[in-house]
Amino acid sequence: MNEPLVRFRHASLGYGAAPVLTDVNLEIPAQSFVGILGHNGSGKTTLLKTILGLIPCMKGHFSSRGAGLGPPRYGYVPQKERLDPIYPLNAYDVVAMGTYRKLELFPRLRGKDGRHLVERCLAACGASHLARRPFSDLSGGQKQRVLIARALTTEPEVLALDEPLAGIDITTQKALLKLLKEFKEERRLSILMVSHRVQAEKGLFTHIVFCDEGQALMGTTQGMLAHGKLSELFRTEL
């Protein structure tokens, strides 16, 4: 029961033969809300994609375990969603894309059960009224709600988001953060969230991973923010 959600031991992470992060040693506990912070190009997305299994660990040890001690189910909201506007995709269609892997294993999702799952996920994100609107016409915040709904269709144990607040206004940012807080508490999700910000999210994070100069440092939010430590890491006053 004490098995961490994610464990790295002396790991090198990156692409091809060039590591972006080296000698990574960290453990992420289950049902935590982890902020992955750092400067642009510091390896935040590389770390997240390795956890998700999208790129392999180059060297060292990496493991990830869900509640059943097998690989956890991930719901992923990528950094930038590029859906060609010529495609006639509405918000409902985009959310339904999250069920495609399920369709291969559970054909029943093609019918009423599949529609109900998509509708429940849209409702959970406060996006039911957007279902028939073209995705390309939505605002940044509305698109994020739809993409989070798509991630929820995997019925995840872990919700992973890469810069979900980028390019949206402060009011919408607060609404989305409130939504994520509710998901963590009500659904008992673990949440991994890449960000280059601190102020808006720091009250939600239980832990912070800071990536900088090829290293990844982790601690509790209280510890990482104590005595200006994170300001020192960011090399600016926070």
Image (tube, rainbow, N blue to C red):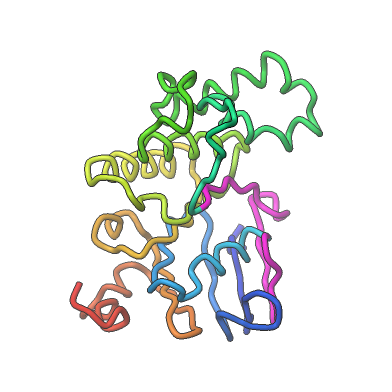
Q: Residue furthest top?
A: 112
Taking the spot 67% from the left edge, 60% from the top edge, the residue there is 54
- Nearer to us in this view, 167 or 3: 167
User: Residue 232, position in %: x, y?
Assistant: 26, 83
User: Residue 124, position in %: x, y?
Assistant: 44, 28
Query: Is residue 231 positioned above or below 33 on the image?
Result: below
Taking the spot 29% from the left edge, 69% from the top edge, the residue there is 222
- Nearer to us in this view, 138 or 54: 138
Q: Is residue 208 magenta?
A: no
Taking the spot 40% from the left edge, 31% from the top edge, the residue there is 138
Q: Main secondary structure of the magenta part?
A: loop
Query: Is residue 118 positioned above or below 74 on the image?
Result: above
Query: Is residue 112 positioned above or below 39 on the image?
Result: above
201 horizontally vs 108: left or right:
left
Q: Which quadrant of the figure has residue 110?
A: top right
User: Residue 154, position in %: x, y?
Assistant: 63, 38
| Residue range corresponding to the magenta coloring | 54-78
**Which corner quadrant holds the C terminus?**
bottom left
- Nearer to us in this view, 89 or 28: 89
Taking the spot 22% from the left edge, 41% from the top edge, the residue there is 171
